[in-house]
Image (spheres, grey):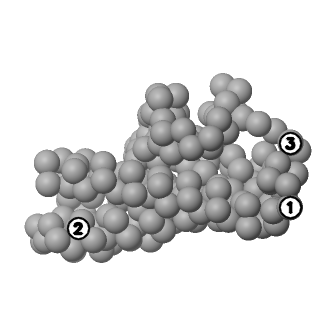
Amino acid sequence: MKKLSLIAMIEAAFFAAFALILDLLPSIKLTPAVSISFAMVPILIIAFRWGVKVSFLSGFLWGLLQIAVGDVQPLSALQLIIEYFIAFACIGAAGLFYLPIQNAIRNQDKKRLVLYVIAATFVGSYARYFWHFLAGFIYWGQYAPKGMNPVWYSFIVNGGTGLGAAIFCSIILVILVPSASRLFIRKALPIETSNRHAS
């Protein structure tokens, strides 16, 4: 169990670092401050490999790394917590589809696998962008166009960004499904295998 926990933590940190690297690559710019990227893909993959807990940890670490490298726009301590710790961790909600995805891989049911991967990606994306939406009208509402309701402004900006990111990440993951489905399966430890045979 200790070995499994150590591997989970190592993978969580590795995928978080990989997400940070992808986030530094050029992305689709909607405005100077709003962009769509596929940087969530590593966190989504670890959600498919391990489930909710490990992917929440990985997303949390990604948010922490964003702060560490200075890739943030802090307005207050609470805004920082909401947008970089809570929001990024909540991508791990995609891990709710861990069991159906693992079963689809085991049964070589590619149609179900694609559907579950897309559904999980949208759940993880909107779990994240819900928090950006809240922070958007609470902290960024002052930047809404004159006469526009800050809530509506945040809904359009963050809802659109969340939808774009979900579609972008879904496309990449669906491409990976047929050619690299092993990427979604964590390697079984010898202790796991022996326990399975014993039961």
Q: Which residue is drawn at 67% across and 39% down?
A: 33
Q: What element carries label 2?
A: helix
Instruction: State the CA–CA distance, disc 1 to disc 3.
Output: 23 Å
Q: Within 10 Å of the Cα at label 1, are there few (<14), some (14-19), or many (20+) other Cα atoms? A: few
Q: In which quarter of the image is the C terminus?
A: bottom left
Q: Which residue is drawn at 69% across and 46% down?
A: 84
Q: How many labels does the image show?
A: 3
Q: Quadrant of the N terminus?
A: bottom left
Q: Nearer the viewer, mark 1 or mark 3?
A: 1
Quadrant in the rendering for residue 196: bottom left
Residue in the foreground of this view, choosing between 96 and 74: 74
Amino acid type for the residue under numbered disc 3:
Leu
Instruction: State the CA–CA distance, disc 3 to disc 2.
Output: 41 Å
Write down the residue under mark 1.
Answer: 147
* Tag of residue 113: 2
Write down the residue under mark 3.
Answer: 75
Horizontal relation, residue 169 to residue 12: left or right: left
Q: Point out residue 22 in the picture as x, y percentages from the top left corner.
A: 45, 33
Instruction: State the CA–CA distance, disc 2 to disc 1.
Output: 45 Å
Placement of 25 over or under 147, stated as above or below: above
Residue in the foreground of this view, choosing between 75 and 109: 75
Q: What element carries label 1?
A: loop
Residue in the foreground of this view, choosing between 120 and 59: 120
Placement of 192 over or under 19, stated as above or below: below
- Earlier in the chain: of badge 1 and badge 3, it is 3
Q: Residue at x 78, y 45 (%)?
A: 80
Amino acid type for the residue under numbered disc 2:
Leu
Q: Point out residue 179 in the picture as x, y percentages from the top left corner.
A: 13, 48
Q: Residue at x 66, y 25 (%)?
A: 69
Q: Point out residue 105 in the picture as x, y percentages from the top left corner.
A: 18, 65
